[in-house]
């Protein structure tokens, strides 16, 4: 008899001790084990059950699989994994865990439970009617392969004489399917050069969800529950479909460019600044439209877009644009889009007495040819009040900053300078529109020190025009 096995009975309960671990068994199970005295049972710290090396299959066979089989999963009614009596073990079909949801989303014609390693099965796969293969890895991640791609993996495994176990890996800004062979980590693209990471899917609560190419999508899926995920997906699709249809109705649509998604902030995981390439027959040229919150389409040209991309690359990274209450398009970096396009921004030499004018007076038209850098004198000519010259300033009014004169400020516009840090003697300048007949309360312009005082005045003067 194997000296690793001892039989005992306590209060009528039969148990078998194998490798110093007690298992509760039926009498027939004990007899079955005892009749196989040639089996040398082994147990280590990493195994739940003792096992023996099966000379026929050249694989390890655990006690659980010796008593039952290795083609199923098992649950225990009393949650005791060492109680292996027949009336305590629930036999589950391996394919049932994700089989139904995969069949509901694909036309499945065949399935395979995968390969067995380290006491469990890995990478079950399903064959579709279109001959593609769906392979499960990393708990609830699956990926799709064509028949030709699947054959390449089989050929590679035959060449190295080893069954590969595939897993999903997400790290920093990259994600893909990997495996290990000996000491090497192998990217699936090493075997399948044309593998597309967009064929990686995410399973949760009987739903299959597509990943996107950006980190934000992955962060959302791993930090939010499925209900939130479905809501955000639905809202995004509805918004984008609605805007796509609006553009199609009014313009000759040539191409759609998806916007970007951030994983932080109030509107995290929502697509921002989608663009459309259109053709203007009257002008005989391409026009680019970009959506900006809260509800505006702005006009750009190819040169403007390239200027923005160049600025993002060299400075802040991706900028999210919105229409400010003053009517101008402002970025998440506190600069206006016309400043970025023309390069006229900041407080450096030559910028304090210059600002950007929109030639057609439309702040949403930011085509490069519609933007003009104006001098102080030109700005003064363009900002006179519609009902005559502005009245003289009162003696109690704060002195105007360098580069600003009274006749540059339209009616109802007031200059302010306030201290926001007394210890460090830090001040900020801004403009208000006060006592305007169409305003219930004063309008307050930007207080950011990143925006020149000339641009702040331009902002206020344009807000006055919108009220007129």
Image (spheres, rainbow, N blue to C red):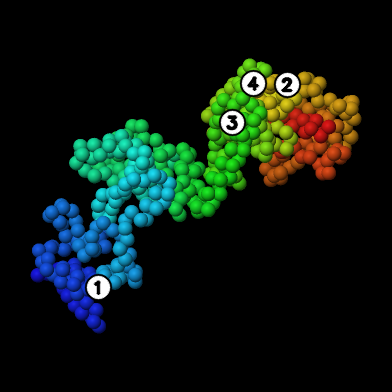
Measured Cα–Cα span from mark 2 to mark 4? 20 Å
- Say the numbered circle drawn on residue 359: 2
Tag 3 residue: 275
Tag 4 residue: 280
Whether pointer 2 and pointer 1 mark residues with C-beta atoms closer than 8 Å, the reply is no
Earlier residue among tags 2 and 4 = 4
Residue 189 placement, left or right of 427:
left
Tag 1 residue: 24
Position above or below: 18 against 436? below
Measured Cα–Cα span from mark 1 to mark 3? 67 Å
Q: Residue at x 26, y 71 (%)?
A: 85
Earlier residue among tags 1 and 3 = 1
Task: Nearest to the eye among marks 2 and 4: give it.
Answer: 4
Q: Residues within 10 Å of mark 1 (few under 14, many from 20)?
A: many
- Say the numbered circle drawn on residue 435: none
Query: Residue 424: where, in percent of width, then height?
Result: 67, 43
Position above or below: 84 against 182? below
Q: Nearer the viewer, residue 330 or 48?
A: 48
Q: Residue at x 71, y 28 (%)?
A: 363
Earlier residue among tags 2 and 1 = 1
> Can residue 120 be seen here?
yes
Measured Cα–Cα span from mark 1 to mark 4? 81 Å
Q: Residue at x 61, y 46 (%)?
A: 266
Badge 1 marks a residue whose secondary structure is strand
Q: Quadrant of the N terminus?
A: bottom left
Q: Residue at x 73, y 42 (%)?
A: 419
Residue 253 placement, left or right of 65:
right
Badge 3 marks a residue whose secondary structure is strand
> Can residue 44 be seen here?
no
Q: Nearer the viewer, residue 331 or 350?
A: 331
Q: Nearer the viewer, residue 205 or 412?
A: 205
């Amino acid at each position: 008899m194997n000296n690793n096995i001892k039989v005992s009975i306590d209060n009528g309960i039969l148990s078998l001790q194998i490798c110093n671990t007690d298992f509760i068994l039926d009498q027939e199970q004990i007899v079955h084990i005892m009749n196989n005295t040639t089996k040398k049972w082994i147990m280590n710290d990493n195994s739940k059950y003792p096992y023996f090396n099966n000379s026929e299959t050249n694989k390890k066979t655990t006690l659980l699989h010796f008593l039952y089989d290795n083609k199923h999963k098992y649950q225990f009614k009393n949650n005791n994994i060492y109680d292996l009596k027949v009336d305590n073990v629930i036999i589950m079909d391996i394919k049932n865990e994700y089989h139904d949801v995969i069949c509901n989303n694909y036309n499945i014609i065949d399935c395979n439970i995968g390969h067995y390693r380290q006491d469990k099965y890995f990478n079950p796969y399903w064959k579709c009617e279109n001959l593609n293969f769906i392979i499960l890895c990393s708990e609830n991640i699956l990926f799709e392969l064509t028949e030709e791609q699947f054959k390449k993996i089989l050929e590679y495994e035959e060449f190295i004489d080893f069954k590969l176990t595939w897993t999903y890996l997400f790290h920093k800004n990259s994600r893909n399917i990997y495996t290990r062979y000996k000491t090497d980590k192998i990217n699936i693209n090493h075997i399948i050069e044309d593998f597309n990471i967009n064929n990686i899917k995410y399973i949760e609560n009987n739903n299959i969800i597509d990943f996107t190419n950006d980190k934000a999508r992955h962060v959302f899926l791993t930090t939010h529950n499925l209900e939130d995920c479905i809501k955000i997906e639905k809202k995004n699709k509805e918004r984008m479909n609605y805007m796509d249809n609006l553009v199609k109705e009014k313009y000759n649509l040539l191409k759609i460019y998806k916007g970007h998604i951030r994983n932080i902030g109030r509107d995290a995981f929502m697509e921002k600044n989608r663009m459309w390439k259109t053709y203007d027959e009257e002008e005989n040229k391409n026009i680019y439209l970009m959506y900006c919150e809260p509800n505006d389409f702005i006009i750009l040209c190819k040169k403007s877009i390239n200027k923005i991309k160049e600025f993002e690359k060299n400075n802040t990274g991706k900028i999210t644009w919105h229409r400010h209450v003053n009517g101008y398009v402002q970025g998440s970096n506190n600069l206006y889009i016309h400043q970025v396009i023309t390069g006229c921004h900041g407080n450096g030499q030559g910028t304090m007495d210059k600002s950007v004018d929109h030639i057609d007076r439309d702040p949403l038209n930011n085509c490069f040819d519609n933007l003009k850098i104006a001098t102080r004198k030109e700005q003064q000519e363009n900002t006179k009040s519609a009902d005559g010259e502005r009245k003289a300033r009162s003696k109690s009014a704060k002195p105007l900053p360098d580069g600003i004169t009274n006749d540059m400020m339209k009616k109802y516009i007031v200059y302010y300078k306030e201290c926001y840090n007394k210890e460090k003697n830090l001040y900020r300048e801004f403009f208000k529109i006060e006592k305007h007949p169409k305003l219930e309360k004063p309008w307050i312009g930007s207080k950011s020190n990143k925006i020149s005082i000339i641009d702040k005045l331009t902002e206020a003067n344009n807000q006055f025009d919108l009220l007129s």
